[in-house]
């Protein structure tokens, strides 16, 4: 897939729309009329004289002019003919509604061919789909959309894009107070992908943030362009990424592949680009509300207030699962809070302000103001509303007014959180959004939004990372090096390895051991998963032990590697690399040795990586506590570990087109000042 060479502006912000087909085309006209589209609409139909009061044209050639946008709701074969005519007429772009193309290739033998023919017919005219509903533009009332929706006209808002037309319908029905400027679908992404559409809508000055529901990355280059423009325009992008890459190849000879996984690589890629990632649709919508009103957060420091200890506990517990911080109060906050709340309230964060000030707008405003002056990135007040059809919500409205007043007085970012989403009435959510206060539906969703917005803010606060390393695989079959060959390669690249010798017979192995000096390690060459196969013997202290061990391994091994025994490490780590089908070569770093799968403690590093990137990845591991002297144990030589990982990263970058897989497990990290050593290594490289 390539990005369309012609801009998408005419298509997504049209002044004239042509519609082709029957029922679906009629619905497009109805939706545009209902939403007040002020441009021209030209129905095209072979038999009808008029549709909804508009003259019908018989063909593209009869249209008064080349339309900015076209909705094509006819069968798949006729779709290709109309696309060709529109392209020749100079139309701005088209939505291809029909299905039966590549998505149905398993059922229809001509599905792939028809999709290729569709793209060829379009030429340089942008097309969206096929197999998609189209889009809704609520800024201009332009709806190339053949179905119901739940949206209203807005003057500014967020754009949400998805491959799935049904998910787009569901999002359009949200009652969360989120102003939706655009809802778009991409279908098969035959020519124009989600990232291309997102690059177009983010340029609209009325768009505040962009949300993507991604089943599979369309184009890494387009995603990079989107991330760069988002950063330039200060409009954040957040994704709900689902599924696995269809092109993924799972390596089987090392631990690296199982530690990485397509999904974890996707997260690392998005993080590097400064694009947020959430796990659910509610989290996506709640995050977009936060980004719409405040943009990315300056950090992850959050305050929380509620009139219940139970709600305070729920908030605190939910925070444990998120990268957010309920930072303690500043000293200057304590006295104003005490004065407004009284002596019986424990001044803390999260704060339970009890019911002593309930219904008292003046005191609530004073308390909320004091909390919001603590320089938190986000200030939350937990407030579940009563049923408006059965109860009186006057005191809840008073609390909302106090929150709004405090936010205006301090300039702080504030939100009201309903612990149960259904306890936030839509009219209340809309009024809060209009006042600049974020109405959050659910505690977990609110903290997910805060975590995501803070992560984007942290990336934007640093210089932009270089583009991910993309290197196409060279021709030739991948071959696995022996451990001795792999270590020789790595040593040349600057990776510390144990002194060692290769041998072809037990006698040569014993001779090599005597040259190196005891104790030694004996390994059988040409054996995968040596430990499980019994092809490793540690701490051999004399010639006779080496001879005996070598005789036992003779039936398994094609030769021997004898190495000097390494002293006991503070910790063992794994570093590896593999080729991801989307992101290219990536690095994996984590707890190694026999604990590699047991702990599943690892991080993904996109390449190229700096030593600062590597140190931050190490510090984020659970095993980092061992490296820095857990419970009085010796500290590890972290500096030496960083240098080894940096050398591996440099080796991967240098051999990016040929390297298929690399696995060093373990790197034995010795006490501070003693270094770090790659004790085992595997490399698969194309010849």
Image (cartoon, grey):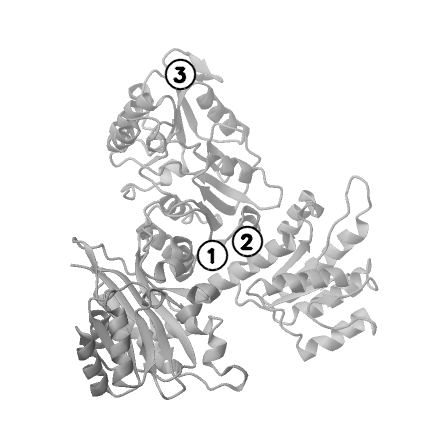
Are dots 2 and 1 in contact, CB under 8 Å? yes
Are dots 2 and 3 in contact, CB under 8 Å? no
**Which of the numbered marks, if any, corresponds to residue 175?**
none
| Residue placed under numbered mark 3 in the picture | 56
* For marks 2 and 1 on the same chain, the one whose residue lies earlier in the sequence: 1
Residue at coordinates 54% horizontally, 49% vertically from top-left? 280
Q: CA distance from mark 3 to mark 1?
A: 46 Å
**Quarter in which the C terminus is drawn:** bottom left
Are dots 3 and 1 in contact, CB under 8 Å? no
Q: Nearer the viewer, residue 369 or 462?
A: 462
Instruction: Please provide percent x and percent y for residue 625.
Output: 50, 77
> Residue 639 sits in which quadrant?
bottom left
| Residue placed under numbered mark 2 in the picture | 287
User: Going by the image, does 65 lie left or right of 319?
Assistant: left
For mark 3, does the 10 Å Cα neighbourhood hold few (<14), some (14 to 19), or many (20 or more) residues? many
For mark 2, does the 10 Å Cα neighbourhood hold few (<14), some (14 to 19), or many (20 or more) residues? many
User: Which-is-in-front pick, marks 2 and 3?
Assistant: 2
Q: Secondary structure at mark 1?
A: strand
Q: Is residue 434 above or below residue 673?
A: above
Q: CA distance from mark 2 to mark 1?
A: 9 Å
**Which of the numbered marks, if any, corresponds to residue 276?**
1
For mark 1, does the 10 Å Cα neighbourhood hold few (<14), some (14 to 19), or many (20 or more) residues? many
Instruction: Please provide percent x and percent y for residue 251.
Output: 32, 55
């Amino acid at each position: 897939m390539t990005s369309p060479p012609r801009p998408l502006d005419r298509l997504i912000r049209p002044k004239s729309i042509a519609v082709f087909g029957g029922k679906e085309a009629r619905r497009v006209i109805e939706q545009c009329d209902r939403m007040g589209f002020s441009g021209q609409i030209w129905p095209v139909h072979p038999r009808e004289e008029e549709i909804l009061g508009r003259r019908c044209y018989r063909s593209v050639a009869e249209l008064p002019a080349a339309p900015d946008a076209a909705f094509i709701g006819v069968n798949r074969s006729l779709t290709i003919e109309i696309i060709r005519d529109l392209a020749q007429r100079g139309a701005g772009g088209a939505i291809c509604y029909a299905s039966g193309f590549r998505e149905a290739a398993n059922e229809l033998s001509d599905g792939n061919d028809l999709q290729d023919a569709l793209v060829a017919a379009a030429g340089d005219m942008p097309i969206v789909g096929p197999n998609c509903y189209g889009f809704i533009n609520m800024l201009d009332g332009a709806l190339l959309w053949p179905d119901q929706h739940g949206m209203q006209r807005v003057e500014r808002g967020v754009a949400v894009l998805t491959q799935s037309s049904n998910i787009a319908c569901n999002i359009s029905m949200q009652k969360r107070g989120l102003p939706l400027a655009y809802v778009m679908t991409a279908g098969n992404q035959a020519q124009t992908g989600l990232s291309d559409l997102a690059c177009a809508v983010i340029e609209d000055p009325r768009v505040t943030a962009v949300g993507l529901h991604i089943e599979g990355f369309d184009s890494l280059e387009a995603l990079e362009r989107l991330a760069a423009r988002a950063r330039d325009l200060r409009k954040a992008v957040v994704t709900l990424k689902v599924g696995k890459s269809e092109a993924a190849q799972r390596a089987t000879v090392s631990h690296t592949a199982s530690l990485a996984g397509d999904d974890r690589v996707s997260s690392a890629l998005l993080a590097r680009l400064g694009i947020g990632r959430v796990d659910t649709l509610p989290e996506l919508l709640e995050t977009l509300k936060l980004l719409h009103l405040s943009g990315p957060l300056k950090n992850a420091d959050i305050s929380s207030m509620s009139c219940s200890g139970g709600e305070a506990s729920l908030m605190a517990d939910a925070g444990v699962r998120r990268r957010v911080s309920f930072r303690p109060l500043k000293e200057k906050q304590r006295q104003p809070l005490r004065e407004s709340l009284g002596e019986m309230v424990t001044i803390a964060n999260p704060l339970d302000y009890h019911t002593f000030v309930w219904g008292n707008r003046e005191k609530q405003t004073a308390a909320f103001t004091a909390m919001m002056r603590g320089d938190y990135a986000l200030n939350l007040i937990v407030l579940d509303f009563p049923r408006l059809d059965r109860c009186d919500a006057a005191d809840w409205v008073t609390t909302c007014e106090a929150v709004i007043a405090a936010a205006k007085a301090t300039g702080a970012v504030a939100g009201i959180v309903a612990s149960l989403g259904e306890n936030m009435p839509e009219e209340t959510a809309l009024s809060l959004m209009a006042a600049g206060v974020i109405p959050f539906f659910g505690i977990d969703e609110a903290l997910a939004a805060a975590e995501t917005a803070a992560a984007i803010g942290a990336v934007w606060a640093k210089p932009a990372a270089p583009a991910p390393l993309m290197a196409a695989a060279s021709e030739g079959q991948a071959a696995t090096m022996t451990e001795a060959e792999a270590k020789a390669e790595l040593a040349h690249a600057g990776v510390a390895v144990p002194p060692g010798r290769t041998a072809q017979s037990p006698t040569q192995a014993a001779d090599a051991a005597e040259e190196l000096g005891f104790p030694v390690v004996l390994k059988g060459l040409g054996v995968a998963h040596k430990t499980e196969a019994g092809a490793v013997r540690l701490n051999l202290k004399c010639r006779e032990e080496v001879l005996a061990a070598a005789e036992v391994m003779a039936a398994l091994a094609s030769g021997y590697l004898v190495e000097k025994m390494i002293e006991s490490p503070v910790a063992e780590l794994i570093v590896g690399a593999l080729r991801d089908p989307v992101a290219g070569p990536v690095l994996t770093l984590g707890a190694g040795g026999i604990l590699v799968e047991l702990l599943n403690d690892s991080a993904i590093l996109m390449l190229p990586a700096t030593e600062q990137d590597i140190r931050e990845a190490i510090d984020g591991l659970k095993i980092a506590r061992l490296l820095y002297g857990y419970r009085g144990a010796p500290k590890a030589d972290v500096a030496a570990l960083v240098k080894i990982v940096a050398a591996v990263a440099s080796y991967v970058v240098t051999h990016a087109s040929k390297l298929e897989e690399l696995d060093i497990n373990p790197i034995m990290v010795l006490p501070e000042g003693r270094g770090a050593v790659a004790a085992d290594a595997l490399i698969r490289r194309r010849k």
